[in-house]
Amino acid sequence: MKEIIADLFPETKFDPTIDVNTRLTLRATDQWCRQRARVSKWDLDVAASDKFHLADRWFTKEQNGLEQEWNADAVWCNPPYDVLEPWFMKAWREVLMLRARLVAILIPGDRPEQPFWQHWVEPYRDGSDYPHPGFWNLQIAAKERVDDRIRMRTSYPPGRQKFGHEGDPLGLNVGSPGWPSVLVVIERLP
């Protein structure tokens, strides 16, 4: 007898007209992330668009959040998924340099074997507050004090998160991606 294998994620359909790096965070996901980050609102959205942003201040793709200072208390980042490492490097730098108190980054949760995760997340996640390896280099480059009392937390939202896109900002006609998400929070300790 031939075994029938069901499609476990029938809602996931590839649409070539959608830019996979433009994912709009839906309200329910935003609320869950703010709760996990322990903030009531985001002060800055560093990977946003003029139409879709989660804070009163935001950087668009054209402004390139990687080239800006993130002077804010609580920073939100839903970065392009094809280049994650620069966003983690920038988040660490902004928190260490005392420009951001907290940075929350929502990324795919199925990439812990990748170099960016092994270098920037794994050694520090879930309460390890050891100085980051780049701490001394940052301090030397800045020629000023940087804060090495940093904590990183990770949280996996329940289920697969849906995202909107330019043509469907509420995500009504979009399935969930084929991977889980993880929220990574990098914060300066009080």
Image: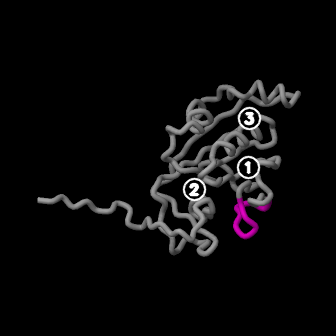
Residue 123's quadrant in the figure?
top right
Is residue 58 magenta-colored?
Answer: no
Quarter placement of the C terminus: top right
Provide the residue designation for mark 1: 74
Seen in the image, is 90 located left or right of residue 8?
Answer: right
Provide the residue designation for mark 3: 190
Name of the residue lying farthest toward the right: 143
Q: Residues within 10 Å of mark 3 (few under 14, many from 20)?
A: few
Provide the residue designation for mark 2: 32
Quarter placement of the N terminus: bottom left
Q: Nearer the viewer, mark 3 or mark 2?
A: 2
Task: Give the amino acid at mark 3.
Answer: Pro
User: Label 1 to label 2, Cα distance in Å?
Assistant: 15 Å
Measuring from the top left, give residue 160's x and y in whole percent. 47, 58
Residue 7, numbered circle: none
Count the marks: 3
The range drawn in magenta is: 48-57
Mark toward the start of the polypeptide (3 vs 2): 2
Asked if 13 appears above or below 121 in the picture, the reply is: below
